[in-house]
Image (cartoon, rainbow, N blue to C red):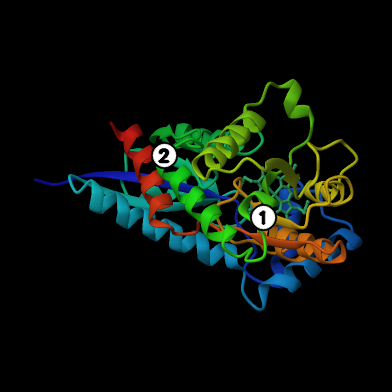
Amino acid sequence: MTKKRIGVLVMSYGTPESLDQIEAYYTHIRRGSPPTPEQLHDLKSRYEAIVGGFFPLRENTNKQLKSLQDTLNREHPEHEFICYHGLKHAAPFIEDGVAGMVEDGITEAIGVVLAPHYSTMSVGSYVKRAKEKAEETGLNMEFVMSYHLHPKLLEALTLRVRKALTLFADARPVEVKVIFTAHSLPEKILEMKDPYPDQLLATASAVAERASITNWMFGWQSAGRTAAPWLGPDILDVLRQIHDDEHVKHVLVCPIGFVSDHLEVLYDIDIECKHLAKQLGMHLERTESLNTDPLYMETLSDVVFEKVK
Ligand code: FEC
């Protein structure tokens, strides 16, 4: 009997492939408006600080896609799952992924974003683009909207927090302030009753409870450099505040809003936050990113298969 073929559009932020592609990438993020020379220089220097000749997000997303495809086909051999890339700000774009499935004769597909929490400005915008292309091409598509409380995702994050706490040999676990973080968004999402902040807090509390942590808080990171207000408090202000007011010496940052090693983790936390922590005399560590953790791959496989059923 021939197996039913199901396309899976694996959507992710996307990254340039080389330093000379940064301008086009940044222009796409800015909806077609090119960055000023200062903005471009600033972004280029952040990439230069982390990339060392390659852009980690691209390789990580490739590995996540392959690993998800393997997991789906291993766990559900009655179907044939074929995964396609759908990047938000780089090729192959979301629309290319949908078109590719149609060209390959796929008639049923599921879309999933490599970001567990829903916001109209994140997951919602990926889904909108995929839906439009699917409708244009006649592809039948369902979407996973969020998976922020999936037990396997929580387990993977909890294991990472426990492991990272062992890096503080000179502190008792209760003396380590755990700061869960995610990408900030413009404050206007609050008026739109966007579920993003609540979903993030729900993940943070669930992981804290599982890891038996009481000394924790939530902070935003990587806010855009625009005049409109962004959700706060920003992680850098949080570090200064807990240093000045609470005399905290040990900090563990757990970026629950991200699933890969990329610019926002490798620069904003590993370089910028660590630099400030050093100036303040604090010991700061970060939990390892999920990347292709089997528990994360199983989370994705479960939520995709749920839509097939
Ligand atoms: O490693 C890499 O090459 C890419 C890392 C990267 C990830 C990422 C994830 C999210 N973003 C989210 C929201 C916004 C909003 C804006 C915005 C701007 C940037 C810029 C860069 C960038 N983002 Fe990003 N984001 C990554 C990188 N992001 C570079 C432009 C320069 C800068 O501000 O630093 C403002 C523009 C706009 O309105 O679109 C908003 C959210 C996520 C997490 C969910 C997801 O992955 O989609 C939310 C990774």
* Residue appearing at x 80%, y 45% in the figure: 234
**Distance from Cα at disc 2 to Cα at disc 1:** 22 Å
Q: Residue furthest bottom?
A: 53
Residue density around tag 2, few if under 14, some if 14–19, many if 20 or more, within 10 Å: some
Which amino acid is tagged 1?
Answer: Leu
Residue pointed to by mark 1: 252
Q: Kindly identify which residue carries mark 2.
A: 151
Label 1 CB less than 8 angstroms from ligand 1: no
Q: Nearer the viewer, mark 2 or mark 1?
A: 1
In the image, taking residue 264 as reference, residue 164 lies left or right, namely: left
Residue at 23% over, 46% down = 76
Image quarter in which the N terminus is found: top left
How packed is label 1: few (under 14 Cα within 10 Å), some, or many (20 or more)? many
Amino acid type at mark 2: Pro
Q: Residue 52, image x and y in percent?
A: 67, 78
Considering the numbered disc 2 on the image, is that residue within a helix, a strand or a loop? helix
Residue, x 84% and y 61% (percent of image)?
A: 276
Circle on res. 118:
none
Residue 21 image point, x, y percent:
70, 66
| Quarter that holds the C terminus | top left
Quick one: 145 or 133, which is closer to the camera? 145
Relative to residue 13, is residue 236 drawn left or right? right
Considering every residue shown, the one lying at the far left of the view is: 1
Residue 210, horizontal then vertical, whole percent: 49, 41
Nearer to us in this view, 280 or 261: 280
Can residue 129 be seen in this snapshot?
no
Based on the displayed image, in which of its 4 quarters is residue 182 positioned? top right
Q: Can I make out residue 29 in this image?
A: yes
Q: Residue 260, relative to residue 275: is it above or below?
A: above
Q: Is residue 59 above or below residue 233?
A: below
